[in-house]
């Protein structure tokens, strides 16, 4: 089998994909067409994993009661974060839209089975956390695949992990990693919203190697 050769145009498209892979907070409420989420999940499972363990577990949250529990979880955690800030920092924080929970038509929680039987422990003896990293690779693959298909993804991280696990009736041995809002972006953009809102900006120094 001959490996594919990616053209200069394909390489350019790849950088464009990375540029437009944004954390979306503003969604259209219309659901994605039938089969799109399955297409995204299929591509996601091409992500690398330690020992071919595939430790990621993607959970779709469809019931209004469970979504409401997640929203209340977010409200409590967000309020605590705001209370811990003061002055201009608190003012700016309060103006940010930090989730798309109310608008996004699809909610997906991602967990990691930290000790899956699949893979038989290969590559995990000295670094067991590699299952978590593998699941994180799957999240990134899902995000990039969604962007290719014109679908927006927003990562809600202001949540209490234990409460999420309980609210969704998930195996307590699974590690909660991400709560993703998924749908069509209301206003697609090529720059981070936090940068556009003046919260933070990219650091050019991060683009240089650290030499040793």
Image (cartoon, helix red, strand yellow):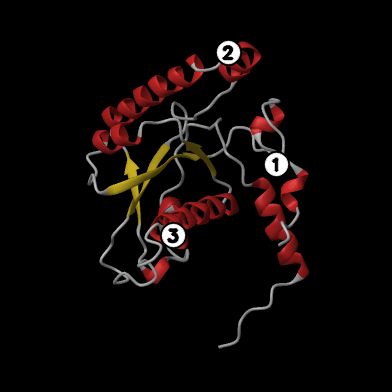
Q: Nearer the viewer, mark 1 or mark 3?
A: 3
Residue 99 in the image, given as x and y percentages of width and height: 49, 29
* Secondary structure at numbered mark 2: loop
* Secondary structure at numbered mark 3: helix
Taking the image as shown, residue 169 lies to the left or right of residue 147, namely left
The residue lying toward the viewer, choosing from 93 and 146, is: 93
Taking the image as shown, residue 123 lies to the left or right of residue 170, namely right
Tell me, for residue 211, which label it has, or none.
Answer: none
- Which residue lies at the image location 39% right of the left edge and 43% below the top edge? 108
* Secondary structure at numbered mark 1: loop
The residue lying toward the viewer, choosing from 138 and 92, is: 92
Relative to 58, does residue 92 appear above or below in the rendering? above
Crowd class of label 1 (few under 14; some 14 to 19; many from 20; radius 10 Å): few
Q: Which of the two labelled residues, at mark 1 and mark 2, occupies the earlier sequence position?
A: 2
Please give the residue where the numbered disc 3 appears in the rendered image. 134
- Which residue lies at the image location 41% right of the left edge and 62% below the top edge? 127
Q: Which of the two labelled residues, at mark 1 and mark 3, occupies the earlier sequence position?
A: 3
Relative to 133, does residue 181 appear above or below in the rendering? above
Relative to 120, does residue 172 appear above or below in the rendering? above
Quadrant in the picture for residue 62: top left
Residue 2 in the image, given as x and y percentages of width and height: 60, 86
Q: Which quarter of the rendering shows the C terminus?
A: bottom right
């Amino acid at each position: 089998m001959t490996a594919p050769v990616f053209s200069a145009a394909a390489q350019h498209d790849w950088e464009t994909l990375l540029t437009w892979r944004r954390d979306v907070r503003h969604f259209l409420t219309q659901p994605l067409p039938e089969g799109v989420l399955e297409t995204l999940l299929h591509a996601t499972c091409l992500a690398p994993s330690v020992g071919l363990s595939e430790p990621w577990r993607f959970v779709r949250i469809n019931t209004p009661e469970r979504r409401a529990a997640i929203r209340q979880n977010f409200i409590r955690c967000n309020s605590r974060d705001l209370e811990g800030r003061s002055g201009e920092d608190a003012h700016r924080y309060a103006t940010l839209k930090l989730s798309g929970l109310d608008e996004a038509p699809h909610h997906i929680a991602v967990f990691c089975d930290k000790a899956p039987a699949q893979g038989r422990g290969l590559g995990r003896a000295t670094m067991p956390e590699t299952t978590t990293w593998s699941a994180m690779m799957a999240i990134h693959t899902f995000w990039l695949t969604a962007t290719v298909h014109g679908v927006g993804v927003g990562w809600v991280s202001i949540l209490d992990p234990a409460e999420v696990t309980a609210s969704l009736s998930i195996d307590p041995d699974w590690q909660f990693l991400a709560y993703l809002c998924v749908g069509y972006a209301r206003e697609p953009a090529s720059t981070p919203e936090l940068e556009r809102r003046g919260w933070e900006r990219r650091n050019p120094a991060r683009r240089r190697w650290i030499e040793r």
